[in-house]
Image: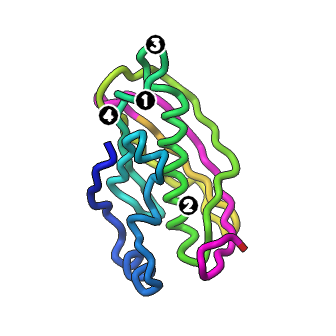
Amino acid sequence: MGEQHSVKFPQEVIDEYAALGIDLPALFSAGDLGVRMGVQIVEASADRVVGTMPVEGNTQPYGLLHGGASAVLAETLGSVGSMLHGGSQKLAVGVDLNCTHHRGARSGLVTGVATPVHRGRSTATYEIVITDEQDKRVCTARLTCMLRDAQPNGAAA
């Protein structure tokens, strides 16, 4: 858990952030919570964000993947997509998260794939489908992020 690996970003995105002196992998990471939960982002663009998370260590008392863990994975992936859509001049802030849990997972990795439903100037909405290692749907989520203007130091306007 927490080991580093390389995320695949579109070259134009890497170039945009590098020109601003911004560490793109750190900016588009799962953050401290994601690290504790073992979230790994393996592909990232405004069109598609893919990440994984282990079931082990993220279960509820019955030994099933905790619904809140699925929500963390979903919000992470949808937020990364929203940030990439908004670009370096915007901050993405989650304002609505909806999760439907379809089946339990007891072991292995779950994989989430976030794809855009709506990408506007002030909001972005992503659908996130989380599946188990047998490609069975565990959770379907929808995240809407507000896109706020960013100040040069990264603080919200």
| Mark 1 vs 4, N-terminal side | 1
* Badge 2 element: helix
Numbered disc in front, either 1 or 2? 1
Q: Amino acid at mark 2?
A: Ser
Contact, CB < 8 Å: mark 2 with mark 4?
A: no
Q: Which dot, 4 or 3, sits closer to the camera?
A: 3
Q: Considering only vertical position in the picture, is 133 above or below 16?
A: above
As helix, strand or loop, the secondary structure at mark 4 comes to strand
Is 138 placed left or right of 100 in the picture?
Answer: left
Which residue lies under the disc numbered 4? 109
Tell me what residue is drawn at x 70 percent, y 66 percent.
Answer: 122
Q: Residue at label 3?
A: 62
Q: Position of residue 43 (x, y in %)?
A: 35, 57
Q: Is residue 90 left or right of residue 84?
A: right
Give the residue pinned by disc 2.
82
- Span shown in magenta: 131-156
User: Mark 1 and 4 residues: CB-CB less than 8 Å, in contact?
Assistant: no
Say which amino acid is labelled 3. Tyr
Q: Position of residue 113 (x, y in %)?
A: 42, 46
Name the residue at 43% across, 58% down.
Answer: 29
Looking at the image, residue 88 sits to the left or right of residue 95; the answer is left
Secondary structure found at label 1: loop
